[in-house]
Image: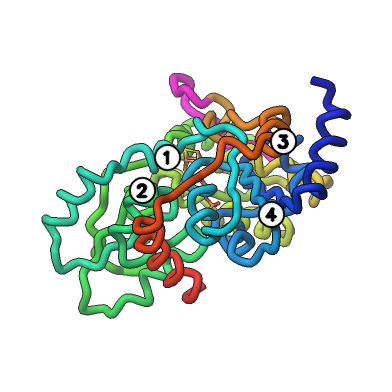
Amino acid sequence: MDKKFLIQEIIRLKQEKNAVILAHYYQNEEIQEIADFIGDSLELSKKAQNTNADVIVFAGVHFMAETAKILNPDKKVVLPDFNAGCSLADGCNPKDFKLFKEKYPDHVVVTYINCSAEIKAMSDLVCTSSNAAKIIGSIPSDKEIIFAPDKNLGSYLKKETQRELILWDGSCVVHEAFSLDKLVEIYNKNPNAKIAAHPESESHILKAAHYIGSTSGIINFIKTDPAAVFIVATEAGILHELSKAVPEKTLIPAPSTEDNTCACSECAFMKVNTLEKLYWCLKNESPEILVNEPLRIEALKPIQRMLELS
Ligand code: 13P
Ligand code: SF4
């Protein structure tokens, strides 16, 4: 389909249906360009909480759109491709998580927002990468904590917060694939560069980083730090926003190991969404995200606690 036509139609349909397009920074450039708002997971949750739109087109992955629906039961939430999953969310199924929780009955359960509504409903608190340390810090020090599903973010939080967290064994296929050897090779060729990494990355990558933070945290760091060259260890989608914001800076995506399936640090789940699928989902108001009401009420509680603390 002609790109110009798609853009015109998306703009027209958006007005006709009072729809808003929320996009994560990992979406492809065309989607970022047409979105009403681009953000990291926390910013998108806040935006979803406050929107006056009747239809939310969530250009991201399933758990993000589902979170928007949990916050907006009366609005229609659609996702361009229903197969936009996430290795973290998919790697933590409710049956196994229930058994895991039962081993630690007195622990406070904190889950990363990258999980399903069922897992959220079994949690005391939800967090994102930008508020995780704050959320852990809000828990009284005499309480023990389970953290799921990201073991890499969890290990980072253990160091940051000095708390003994029991970790679920999950990881992000994109952030886990960065190659330290290749990162060091690039850094040796650019010794004045700063390395910025997402905390979903493994600890050896984080040890090498000058800055660790969420997607928006990394963007703000690169915008404000005086260095001229940055090596960016997160999904390559953020380079679009950065190349517009700081065209004078050199941005080098951190390389992945050769044998991984997500070459070039791209999240295959995020990238299943396309401009054309976005057009069809807005036009047909489908695929729609639905969450049954008893589950939604339980999943909402830890999200609301997070938003109150953020
Ligand atoms: P943030 O948006 O919190 O940086 O998380 C990144 C991510 O992997 C989302 O799936
Ligand atoms: Fe999930 Fe990783 Fe993709 Fe984010 S980048 S959606 S955590 S697989």
Q: Amino acid at mark 3?
A: Lys
Q: Amino acid at mark 4?
A: Ile
Cβ of mark 3 under 8 A from ligand 2: no
Task: Please state which of residues 232 and 138 is positioned toward the viewer in this rendering.
Answer: 138
How packed is label 4: few (under 14 Cα within 10 Å), some, or many (20 or more)?
many
Give the secondary structure at mark 3: helix
Task: Please state which of residues 260 and 205 is positioned toward the viewer in this rendering.
Answer: 260
What is the magenta range?
251-262
| Residue named by callout 3 | 283
Q: Compared with residue 248, is residue 212 higher up or lower down, i.e. above or below?
A: below
How packed is label 2: few (under 14 Cα within 10 Å), some, or many (20 or more)?
many
Mark 4 or mark 1, whichever is nearer to me: 1
Task: Please state which of residues 243 and 118 is positioned toward the viewer in this rendering.
Answer: 118
Asked if the residue at tag 2 contacts the one at tag 1, i.e. Cβ–Cβ closer than 8 Å, the answer is: yes
Cβ of mark 1 under 8 A from ligand 2: yes
Give the mark, 3 or 2, whose residue is nearer the N terminus: 2
Give the mark, 1 or 2, whose residue is nearer the N terminus: 2
Q: In the shown orientation, is residue 164 left or right of residue 204?
A: left
